[in-house]
Image (cartoon, rainbow, N blue to C red):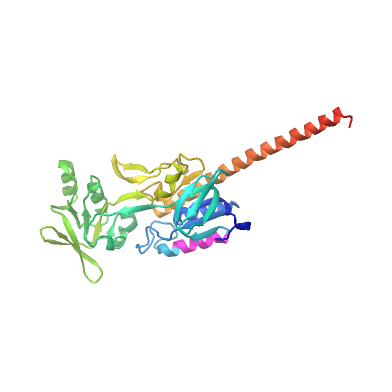
């Protein structure tokens, strides 16, 4: 990162914290709007384990790393800057705007912040499950359903949305098994819906995954039964990566789906504007169920709103300066008249 002349902390119109689809799309939009923009990315994309990005028009199946590399090239091609680093704090200095501190001790200044730090998937604690996450242990059928179509799919039931999840995955395969695991009582309606869709229901906790030749082959139950399974759908708890915002007074709040809490997020309006003036959020840190293409769109919307906000502030300052200039000119003319000039 290039330092400002004299060793001062460099100031940008916008600092983007997070370099995923949302952050890079926002940075690209801002750079094309002729804004000075810096992207700070820790290099830990949530979708790194996945083989490809899906349901992203014209980029179907693109490896996540390849998509990000192309995005970075586009941002820097328009003059945006990108650095690798972890933001440890965001502060409000007396001079106005924001001061963003990195883990190496350096800091930059920004007139506006766009935070696109994403979320952390808190997975059920089952031996071997985390190691298969994004490969055969899956969450979103729209992201991975096609890749495991017509295979034996298990549903690891851990919460009240498990039945809904099973019915969704049934769209991609007729061979779906519902593992009750730690889910609450399904009730008559839940059992009836699963039975109507020919989804087998098995009691007992899942205690381990069976892997052969680096491929999921089944799940082991507490009674030592092994049920064949080629993919296992789970519902993580989605936790927003929002620590960087706490110093600005922004705390993550619970997000609900169908009346059930699925995790935490930073509340914002449709453009990504938060309760703190000058701070926007986009992507999974704001909307937990957003897919990659949706996160990219959210980044563009937030960037457009940020640019409009900067334009409004610059216009206010220009008007104030013009009024002050006209007032000073009027005063000089009046003073000239008083002295016969």
Please state, as top left, top right, bottom left or bottom right, where the N terminus lies in the image: bottom right
Residue visible at 52% across and 43% down? 278
Residue 68 part of the magenta segment? yes
Residue visible at 24% across and 58% down? 232
Counting from the top left corner in percent of width and height, residue 77 is at 57, 61
Counting from the top left corner in percent of width and height, residue 53 is at 39, 60
Magenta stretch, main secondary structure, is: helix
Instruction: Name above or below for residue 9 compared with residue 315.
Output: below
* Nearer to us in this view, 192 or 111: 111
Left or right for 182, reference 319: left
**Span colored in magenta:** 67-77
Q: Say which quarter of the image contains residue 187.
A: top left
Residue 54 part of the magenta segment? no
View extreme (top): residue: 338
Instruction: Name above or below for residue 275 compared with residue 48.
Output: above
Counting from the top left corner in percent of width and height, residue 183 is at 19, 48
View extreme (left): residue: 223
Left or right for 28, reference 153: right
Q: Say which quarter of the image contains residue 251.
A: top left
Q: Say which quarter of the image contains residue 3.
A: bottom right
Instruction: Name above or below for residue 267 compared with residue 50.
Output: above
Left or right for 304, reference 318: left
Please state, as top left, top right, bottom left or bottom right, where the C terminus lies in the image: top right
* Nearer to us in this view, 44 or 198: 44
Counting from the top left corner in percent of width and height, residue 275 is at 46, 39
């Amino acid at each position: 990162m290039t330092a400002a002349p004299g060793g001062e902390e460099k100031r940008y119109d916008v600092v983007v914290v997070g370099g995923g689809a949302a952050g890079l799309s926002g940075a690209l939009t801002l750079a094309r709007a002729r804004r000075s923009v810096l992207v700070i990315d820790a290099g830990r994309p949530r979708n790194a384990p996945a083989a490809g990005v899906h349901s992203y028009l014209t980029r179907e199946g693109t490896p996540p790393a390849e998509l990000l590399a192309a995005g970075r090239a586009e941002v820097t091609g328009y003059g945006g800057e990108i650095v690798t680093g972890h933001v440890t704090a965001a502060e409000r200095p007396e001079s106005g705007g924001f001061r963003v501190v990195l883990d190496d001790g350096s800091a930059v200044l920004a007139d506006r912040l766009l935070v696109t730090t994403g979320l952390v998937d808190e997975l059920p604690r089952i031996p071997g499950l985390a190691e298969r996450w994004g490969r055969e242990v899956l969450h979103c059928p729209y992201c991975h359903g096609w890749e495991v179509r017509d295979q034996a799919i298990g549903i690891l039931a851990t919460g009240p949305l498990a039945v809904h999840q099973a019915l969704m995955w049934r769209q991609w395969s007729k061979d779906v098994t519902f593992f009750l695991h730690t889910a609450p009582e399904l009730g008559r309606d839940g059992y009836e819906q699963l039975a109507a869709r020919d989804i087998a229901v098995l009691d007992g906790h899942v205690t381990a995954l069976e892997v052969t030749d680096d491929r999921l082959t089944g799940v082991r139950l507490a009674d030592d039964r092994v049920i064949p399974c080629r993919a296992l759908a789970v519902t993580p708890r989605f936790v927003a990566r929002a620590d960087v915002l706490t110093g600005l007074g922004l705390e993550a709040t619970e997000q609900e789906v169908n009346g059930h809490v699925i995790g935490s997020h930073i509340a914002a309006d449709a453009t990504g504007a938060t309760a703190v003036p000058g701070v926007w959020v986009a992507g999974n840190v704001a909307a937990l169920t957003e897919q990659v293409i949706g996160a990219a769109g959210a980044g563009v919307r937030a960037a457009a709103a940020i640019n409009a906000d900067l334009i409004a502030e610059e216009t206010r300052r220009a008007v104030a300066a013009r009024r002050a200039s006209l007032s000073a000119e009027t005063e000089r003319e009046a003073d000239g008249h008083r002295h016969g000039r």
